Each structure stands twice: as C-alpha cells, then as structure tokens.
Image (cartoon, rainbow, N blue to C red):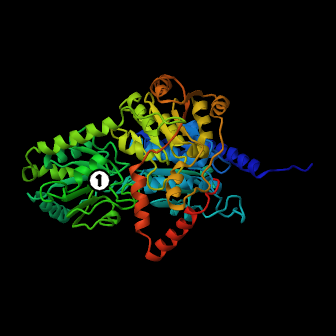
Amino acid sequence: MDLEFSRRGLLEGSAALGGALAASSATAGPIAKIRADHHPGWVFGRMTGAQALTEALLAEGVGCVYGIPGAQENELWDSFKAKGLEYLLVTHEFSAACMADAYGRSVGRPGVLCVVPGPGVTNSLTGLGEALLDSSPVVAIVGDVGVGEKARPFQVHALNQSELLKQVCKCVYPVQNVGQIPGAVRQAFVAAMSGEPGPVAVVVPYNLFIEAHDYRCPPPAVPAPAFDEEAFQKALAVLCDPKARVGIYAGFGCVNFTTELAAVAELLQAPVSTSVSGKGVIPETHPLAVGWGFGPHASEVAEKVFAKDKLHPLKSGVNTLLAIGVKFNETSTGHYVNPQPDRVVHVDANPCNLGRILRTDVCVHADAGVFLGRLLACSDKLQRPANNALTARIRELKAAACRELRDIPQPKCGVDPLALVAAMRRVLPVDALLFTDVSATEHLAAEFYQVTHPRTYFNPVDNQAMGWSIPAAIGAQKVHHGKVVATITGDGCALMSSLEISTAAREHLPVKFVVLDDQAYHYMQMLQKPAYLRTTATILARFDYRSMAQAMGVAYVEIQTHDELEPKLRGAVCHAGPVLVRVATDYGKRKIRWIEAVRDRYVDDLTAAQKARFLARVGSRAIKPKDND
C-alpha cells in the first residue's frame, strides 16, 4: 500500500520522534544527575535544543513570547508550553514584532518574538525596523531551514534569513550547532540592552531543536556602561560657565534616570524639553518641564522658552544646549528645523549618534545615567540660584496652553481631534499606557497630552510604521495586568492591523481601541492640498466598526459630538474587557504645528529650478477647474 506524506506531516513526525528520543536520553550520562539548581543562572544539564532555548528565555525572566508557531518551530513552542513560558498567539508576524517592541519600551527589558523563516521573517521586518530606529530592545527567535548531511536544496522558506534580518537588527546570531543555542540567546539579551538598545535576532535551523546536548552555559558577561572621562570634563567646563543659559533636550535614553534628570535640571535651573519618545522622562508637571522639541514644529511652550528674545538676546532664552540620550531625528526635529544654539553638548550611549545634525562643541560617548550621576557629584561647581523669572514664565505659558484645550468649537461633522486628546487625558489614569499611531493627531497628542510617568506614552517615531499602535497596545496589556491601556489610532492605521483586536477578544485583554474615523488619510491631505491644489489616493472606504466589534466579540462605543466624549470614554475605561471606540472625526481647519513647520521646510529644501517647476504647476492648476477628488 502506498502512503502519502506531506512536508508538514514529516516535520511533525520527526519532532515527535525527537521528543521521545530526548526523553529516553534525559537520564543518561553523569551530567544529567547534577541538579541545575546547583548552578543558578546557568542553562545546565542534558536537554534538547528547544528545551535549552526555553531555559535561556526563562533565565532572562521573559514575561511573554509573541508569535505564530509553524512547522519549523513546533518543537520549540511545545517546549514553551511544557516549561510554563508565557506566550501569545497573534494573527500576523508584524504584530508579533510590534508587541515585542511595546514590551521592550514599557517593561525596560527585551521583548521576545518567535517566528518561522521566510514569510514569518519578512512579515516581521517592519516592526523590527521600528524597534531599531526607536531604540527599543527586542530579541527575535527565528527558525531556519534544516542544515546538516540530510538537508536538501530548495526547502520551503529558504530565504537568507540572516541577511534579511541584518537590515533591521543591531546584530544577528546564526546558530551553527545545537550546543550554541542557549549561549546565543543569552548573548542576544546582552546585545539588545548594551549601548543604544535595539533588536537582535537569533537564527536556529529547525532540526537543531530536536537534537540533545549536555549544556553547561553560564550567564554572559555584561559590559560596563560607556563613559568618556575626557569628554565629560570638557562638557563640565561648558556647563560651569556662568554665562551659559542651559536648556536640556532629553530623549528615551534618560527613561531609567528620571529622578537624576530632574535633579540636574534643578541644579542648572535649566528648562527641559524632550523628544517624542522621551515624553515622560521628566514629569510634564515639573516647573522646568516645557514639553517636547524646542522649535516651531513642537511644543509652543518649549519654543518660546528656548528662543532668544530678539530685543534682548543676551538676557533670555537658551544659549547652551545639553542633549542627553537623544537623536536629532527627522520627526522629533520637524525635518531638522530646530534652532542652532551658541553651544551644544551632546551625550549618547551610541557614538554614531553624536554631533550629526546640530553643530556640536562637545560630544560625550556616555550612558545617560552615568553622565547624570557624575554631574550631580559636581553639584558644588554647577549649582545655580533659583530662577524664579524662568519658572514663572513656564507656568504662564503652560496655563495659556491649557486654556487652548477649553471650549474647543464643535465641528460640523464630528469631533475635533484636539478635543479627543484633551478628553482622553482627563479620563485616563496618570499611569495608563497610551499608544498613538501614524496620524495627524499624533502631533497633537505629543504637544497636548500631558505625561507625568515614564514608560506610559508610546509612538512609532522614526520608522512611522502605520498600524503599530493596535498590536503594541495588546502586547503591553498582556504583561501590564491591572493597568489601563489605550490607543489613539487613525482609521487608515486601523485598516492595517485591526484584525489583531480579535487577539484581545480571545485573551480578554481589556485594551481601549480608540479610532479616529474620517474616511481619509487626512495627514496626506494636509500635505498634498497646499502643494498640489488637490489630493490623490487619500479617500478610504466607509467601514462598519460596530459590525466589526460584534464579529470579534468586543464592546463597542460610538462618539459623534464633544458632549459625548468624556462620559463615553469613561464608560469604555470602566468596562472590564476590550472596547472598540469609533470617534467620528472632523479636522476642519485645525492647524498642527508640526505639519506647518515641515511643509515650509520641504519647500525651502527645493532648488531654484525645482521651485520654479513647482510654482508653474500649481499656478496652472489654480486657474483651471479643480479636479473632482
């Protein structure tokens, strides 16, 4: 009788056989008789590659693995279950990467995803790229095609996984034999956190998961934080100058040192602005906190406090910038429109980030925490008298910004997005986790959503991966039990990842998914309309969110007016399960500082010939009937 075998059946059969062989050999050899608890922190004893990898993850204190099992990794996922390692099945590998990213940002330790080779890897690349550019620690466990004497050519998923991953990871560890597995995983955790955090991948051929080996794998050495003493002394001399009016620009690199950052600001009597991802590294209620950015694209409070008074340039504003744990990236600088201070000291754990945009006087390769600690140790040299005029001006400007959030006019066709941002701040607890997405409203939230706790405000800043917020919020809710987790998601972003809401429904993860619905890519419309006098490819289909919520088994709320905002959002927050909130949105004439600044800068960057062609095209369209969009 002929028997038909599928590739999946063969893989599953070999995995079962490998498990049986491993179990039968688990008691063989003297090493198996030595208890692992004699070597705390080690991966120790005879076990399969899958078991050793799981033990390595447990030794690192991993709270959850995000991903989708496949034929190449079923042995590994079975080991997760057998050893009690928490995992979360997702609907798409992009989501797995976003969830691991959110774990890294919100917990402060590497998030872990586990994907199969081929499409599993390629689907995850966008989320890994976001983690790389946003300095978020992630470890990707990636299966690979089989190797060894029995390996055949043209295996399914036989892309070059390692080369693909190198484009979006700090480093990649391709495992060559079963004995390397736990060491590669443990080293990946060290690399993900060392210097500037970021994603690291471990690539394991699937046949190594079922091989057995005698392991004696100790914890890896952790390198000391970077610190350039000579550069620190130069920075200290700049900051000690009595003529220096210091302003601090702080990034996510300061997130573990919020107390030290505030103390240094008070020591120097320096206003503190942050990058977008740095929101929360100093409480925005602090008397010296001025919001994010310090140019025309960002917080108006920060711009006015940092700017020199044209009438009295020697008596006001910031003339010395201390940038700590931050990159001057395009988003956080509004396409590089930050003004150039007289002197700049830039401190970062990654030397490749130093002195890249602004003219910089002193570059200090140093961990932010070590640098701040050393400044505090020199307090006798740096102590400034209380600047009551400065704090009074900051207080006055903040009060004016708060007044802007009161009595926002009701648009014709829905809710002003700024009114939504203000209402969410009122209804969410101060320690709630808010995940924003790539929409025009992300810039309103960055300016007006007040953050007082670190690791509570998250945005896909540098890769601008649309659809990031929904899976990221789910990934965070999985490990932040009892905390309120919410999103501010545009309808275009929701179309890219909203099926992941089914994961929240299945696991009863009570995320509040707030979607701004105007049936358009309004962000692109705001950029296109002034430049081209028309919009192109920006209209979205009408979508029945109520039916989607019903189909996935989550609660549903619809908001049409400003009067409904606060009561309905409070109801959603109090609901014990996941809630989909549709907010009918009308941007109307709502101006957004970031978009206005960026639009002007793009025009400034054009050559004379390009500007001439641009103006000629716009001029010809202005005198013709407008196209029906």
| Residue 419, above or below 374 | above
Asked whether the viewer can see residue 383, the reply is yes
Relative to 399, residue 217 above or below? below
Decide: is 567 above or below 16. above
Residue 273 horizontal/vertical position (percent):
28, 49
Badge 1 amino acid: Phe
Looking at the picture, tell me which residue is in the foreground, 457 or 531: 531
The residue that appears at 63% across and 40% down in the rendered structure is 499
Q: Is residue 178 left or right of residue 435?
A: right
Could you tell me which residue is drawn at 48 percent across and 52 percent down?
185
Callout 1 crowding tier (Cα within 10 Å): few <14, some 14–19, many ≥20: many
Helix, strand or loop status at disc 1: loop
Q: Quadrant of residue 350?
A: bottom left
Residue under label 1, please give it. Answer: 294
Is 177 in front, or is 66?
Answer: 66
Above or below for 147 versus 395: below
- Asked whether the viewer can see residue 134, the reply is no
Looking at this rendering, what residue extends furthest in the bottom direction?
Answer: 609
Q: Quadrant of residue 236?
A: bottom left
- Residue 616 pos. (x, y %): 52, 70
User: Where residue 267 sits in the image (x, y, percent)?
Assistant: 13, 47
Tell me the quarter of the picture where residue 68 sits. Answer: top right
Q: Residue 409: x and y, percent?
A: 43, 34
Q: How many marks?
A: 1
Residue at image coords 57%, 49%? 94
Residue lying farthest to the front in this orientation: 623
